[in-house]
Image (spheres, rainbow, N blue to C red):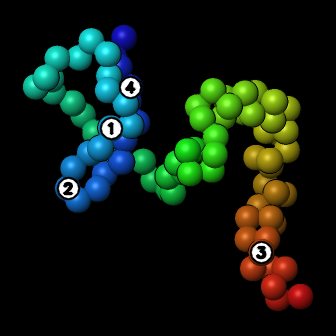
Amino acid sequence: MLPTVQGIYRGGKIELQETPANVADETRVIVTFLAGQVILLESHGINEVQAAELRTRLAAFAEDWESSEMSAYDNYDAAKAKL
């Protein structure tokens, strides 16, 4: 299994959020840049375990959230400001 570690690209370098286990120095890597905004859990006062628990509890709503009708709420604050 290939190890996966999250990180952030900053100043021409990749800063890993954790040190991967059992990976030797000078190991080749492939970096894939993810589109969209990166949300740092810690900045919202939540850790990975809490985020996983929250995702599990909210999974029942996923089908509704992902429906096309919910796109009306994508820019809710901007739409509300126009009222």
- Rounded to the nearest whole Å, what is the CA distance between mark 3 and mark 4? 35 Å
What's the amino acid at mark 4? Answer: Thr
Residue 16: which disc?
A: 1
Q: Secondary structure at mark 1?
A: strand
Q: Which residue in the structure is indicated by mark 3?
A: 77
Q: Secondary structure at mark 2?
A: loop
In space, the residues marked 1 and 3 are separated at their CA atoms by 34 Å
Sequence-wise, the earlier of marks 3 and 4 is: 4
As helix, strand or loop, the secondary structure at mark 3 comes to: helix
Mark 2 and mark 1: Cα distance apart in space: 13 Å
Residue behind mark 4: 4
Between label 2 and label 1, give the one nearer the viewer.
Answer: 1
Query: Which residue has dot 2 on it?
Result: 12
Which percent across, then down, holds residue 22? Answer: 27, 12
Query: Would you identify the image quadrant in which residue 28 lies?
Result: top left
Residue at the image position 72 percent from the left and 27 percent from the top: 53
| Residue ID at (21%, 50%) | 13
